Image: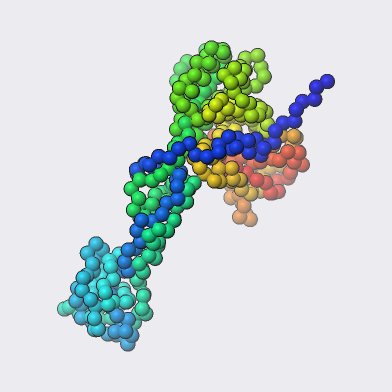
Amino acid sequence: MNTPSPLLPVADALVRVLQSAPGILGVERVPLAECAGRTLAEDLAATRTQPPFAASAMDGYAARAADIADAPATLRVIGVSAAGHGFAGVVGPGEAARIFTGAPVPAGADTVIIQEDTEASDGVVKCLRSEPVGRNIRRAGLDFSVGDVLLPRGRRLGPCELALAAAMNHGALPVARKPRVALLATGDELVAPGQNPGPDQIVASNTYAVMAYARAAGAETIDLGIAADSFSALEDRLKAAREAKADILVTLGGASVGDHDLVQSALAKEGMELGFWKIAMRPGKPLMHGRIGDMRILGLPGNPVSAIVCGVLFLAPLIRALCGDPDAGADHSGVATLGADLGPNDGREDYLRATLSPGRDGLPVATPFSRQDSSMLRVLAQSECLVIRPVRAPAATKGEACRFIAL
């Protein structure tokens, strides 16, 4: 009697997937306005000092701290310094300059008195309180200086990073080329959304969720449509993936062992080097990984929840790794307390769809749904997280700690 091979642990499967992404796929210079969500391919250094001059942090009057040490003190106003239009003169003893937020502090001045602490009339200003040297002044280089490396390669560019890059005076950024992800749904039973399914057919849904996750991770996506359960149909779609120069081919369905599950055989015929097939996970056991030349293969299960969970756990990190993210494989799970009792787990790591709600002790409460069938998209759409149940975990009671991945 043959003993079944042990299933590959989830952590080991992720390591193998990430090992197929040794680095970025190329570097592009992209206009700053188009860089949201992209990943830096090189360290980014400041090309200027910010602020480039000592600037006022408030509206008020620039003066010499020594002149107002014994406030109240009356000073003669000799000019105005506004943002973009600094005062070119020098503030001397007994003098002040009207100044506005962001404006250069005139030479000679070493403090700024806010306008609420002054009384101005007929070319003079009465300072009602003293201020020390440097008060309300942002020194030159307070934020950063020329040559400072402020954004490291591998950093994903969000709104704050883009603002910083702009302040560093970069109009275009070196970013990693987006991985091209081709998605292929398989099965005679599938029709595209909006069509009229036959009596034995269902509407294909997996592609749209996995495609959305791929784009969110930083990929460019290519929809290869639906391939029928025949070698010729699969060969035609595989050819299309190669012609599109896909970096990753994601197949959806057809990766199991049934008579109509032809994907693995078709891929093998095209020269796929199989990395692994089947992992110790629920949902998602039939996950397949391999490559054909430079094209990485991820064969996701056909059940909707299984495909989507595998997309979250494996496809998104692979895309991030190909973008150069050094933390692509990092554990982003959090800690919560269980909102329901759970029975003991078996030999597969379980990912339970669950809701999240505030807890009394500061930790959220994760409550798994009672029904966890991997075909139920309605439950997944109502879920806010996946509760992780380790292999052979003992029964757990409501209120115990658990780990979760936010959806």
Q: Position of residue 345 (x, y in %)?
A: 74, 37
Location of the N terminus (image quadrant): top right
Name, please, the residue furthest toward the bottom. 70
Residue at 56% across, 46% down? 327
Position of 39 with respect to 230 (left or right) is left
Q: Is residue 77 above or below residue 139?
A: below
Whether residue 179 is visible: yes
Position of 351 with respect to 68 (left or right) is right
Location of the C terminus (image quadrant): top right
Question: Would you identify the image quadrant in which residue 110 lies?
Answer: bottom left
Q: Position of residue 138 (x, y in %)?
A: 36, 68
Residue at 59% across, 38% down? 18
Question: Would you identify the image quadrant in which residue 118 lies?
Answer: bottom left
Q: Position of residue 372 (x, y in %)?
A: 65, 32
Residue at 29% across, 80% down? 64
Q: In this orientation, which residue lies closer to the viewer: 260 or 334?
A: 260
Position of 148 with respect to 262 (left or right) is left
Q: In this orientation, which residue lies closer to the viewer: 67 or 401?
A: 67
